[in-house]
Amino acid sequence: IAGITQAPTSQILAAGRRMTLRCTQDMRHNAMYWYRQDLGLGLRLIHYSNTAGTTGKGEVPDGYSVSRANTDDFPLTLASAVPSQTSVYFCASSDSSSSAGELFFGEGSRLTVL
Amino acid sequence: GQNIDQPTEMTATEGAIVQINCTYQTSGFNGLFWYQQHAGEAPTFLSYNVLDGLEEKGRFSSFLSRSKGYSYLLLKELQMKDSASYLCAVLDSNYQLIWGAGTKLIIKP
C-alpha cells in the first residue's frame, strides 16, 4: 500500500540520548515535512525539504536536524533529547513544493523523553 | 504575526448539521485547507478553497471569504464516525502551511 511509513511508532528515551525518527514514502513526492503536535497547539513545522538534497528550517527547528539524501527518505534526528521534546511527531509529504497544502501524513511517532 | 483561530471544542447531535468556523491572519494567502484527525491517528485531507465561495464534497462543504479572512466547514447528516478534530490551515506567501490548533467535535446520539 502506497504511503508514508514512520518508525518507531512509540519510544521512551532518556534525556541526553540521541534518537533518529525514520520516515519513508513511496509516492515519489518532492516535498517532505516533519511536524510535532502537542496538546492544545497546532501542528508545528520542524524542518522541511522541497526536493532531494535540500532542507529548510521550520517554526521550531532547534534541537533537531534532518537530511534528504534521496526522494524517499527523510529522517529526523534529536542529537541530545530533552523532556520538552516529548511529543507526537508526524512526517508528511506533498507532490509539489508549490502545492504544499495537500499533505499525506504518516501514522506518527510518539516520543517520551524522561 | 500569523494567526489562525478556531473553536476548541464543539458538540452536536447525530443526524444534525454543524458549522466549524476558522478565521485567519497570515502573510499572504495561497489557499485554505481543512483536515480531519481522529484521536490517535494522523490528519487526513478533507477540502481546499482558494477562491471565494462554497466547495461541496458529499456531506462536507467548505466556504471561504478571503476579504473577511474567514472560512467554515459544514458537516451535514452527522454520524458518530464524524467525532474527530478538524484542523484549519492556510498556505502563506512562502507556501508554508500555518495550522490552527483544531476543533474537537463531539457527536452525541
Image: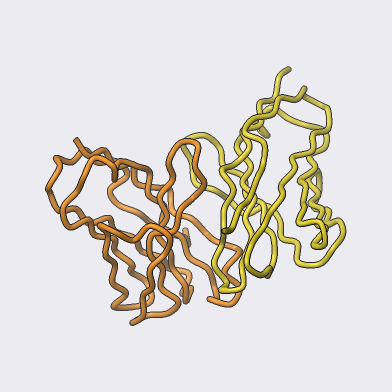
Q: Residue at x 26, y 38 (%)?
A: A112
Q: Residue at x 41, y 73 (%)?
A: A49
Q: In this view, does A7 lie above or below B108?
A: below
Q: Position of residue A41 (x, y in %)?
A: 49, 42
Q: Residue at x 77, y 31 (%)?
A: B78
Q: Position of residue B39 (x, y in %)?
A: 51, 34
Rendering quarter of residue B33: bottom right
| Horizontal side of residue B52 vs B21, given as left or right | right
| Horizontal side of residue B93 vs A87, given as left or right | right
Tag count: 0
- Locate the N terminus of chain B and report the quarter of the image it occupies: bottom right
- Locate the C terminus of chain B and report the quarter of the image it occupies: top right
Q: Which chain is orange?
A: A
Q: Where is residue B65 in the image (x, y as percent from the top left)?
A: 83, 58
Q: Which residue is drawn at 24% across and 59% down?
A: A77
The colour scheme used here is by chain
Q: Which chain is yellow?
A: B
| Horizontal side of residue A42 vs A33, given as left or right | right
Rendering quarter of residue B47: bottom right
Rendering quarter of residue A53: bottom left
| Horizontal side of residue B78 vs A100, given as left or right | right
Q: Looking at the picture, tell me which residue is in the foreground, A45 or A107.
A: A45
Query: Most extreme residue toward the right, as rendered?
Result: B53
Q: Where is residue B12 in the image (x, y as percent from the top left)?
A: 75, 25
Query: Most extreme residue toward the front, as rendered?
Result: B1
